[in-house]
Image (cartoon, rainbow, N blue to C red):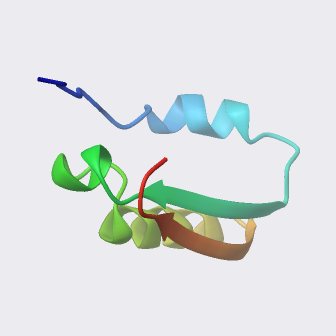
């Protein structure tokens, strides 16, 4: 059995990682992180909205079946 444990990065860490970047493409996965509610469609949409509010340009977003 494969067990996947996922958790979102803290917002401060994401801010640091994305510093200086303006155009972003948000990608999620349709398997484990969808099941744990940490990276599926809803979370990709929410992340895109947060990034837009921070002045980032989200040039696209998708959820692939398997990462």
| Frontmost residue, 8 versus 15 | 8
Q: Is residue 54 visible?
A: no
Question: Horizontal and vertical percent for residue 3?
Answer: 17, 25
Asked which quadrant contains residue 20, the reply is: top right
Kindly identify the residue that appears in the image at 49 percent across and 47 percent down.
67
Asked which quadrant contains residue 40, the reply is: bottom left
| Total numbered labels placed on residues in the image | 0
State the quadrant of the N terminus: top left
Question: Horizontal and vertical percent for residue 47?
Answer: 48, 61
Question: Horizontal and vertical percent for residue 11?
Answer: 48, 39
- Which residue reaches farthest front? 1
Q: Is residue 67 above or below residue 53?
A: above
Question: Horizontal and vertical percent for residue 4?
Answer: 23, 28
| Frontmost residue, 40 versus 15 | 40
Kindly identify the residue that appears in the image at 69 percent across and 31 percent down.
16
Q: Is residue 64 left or right of residue 32?
A: right
Q: Is residue 4 visible?
A: yes
Kindly identify the residue that appears in the image at 70 percent across and 64 percent down.
25
Q: Is residue 16 above or below residue 22?
A: above
Q: Is residue 7 above or below residue 58?
A: above
| Frontmost residue, 41 versus 48 | 41
Asked which quadrant contains residue 45, the reply is: bottom left
Q: Is residue 24 above or below residue 52?
A: above
Kindly identify the residue that appears in the image at 36 percent across and 37 percent down.
8
């Amino acid at each position: 059995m494969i067990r996947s444990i996922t958790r979102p990065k803290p917002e401060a860490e994401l801010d640091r990682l994305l510093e200086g970047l303006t155009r972003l493409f948000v990608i999620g996965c349709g398997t484990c992180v969808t099941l744990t509610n940490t990276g599926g469609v809803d979370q990709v949409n929410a992340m895109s909205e947060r990034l837009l509010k921070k002045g980032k340009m989200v040039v696209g977003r998708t959820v692939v079946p398997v990462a």
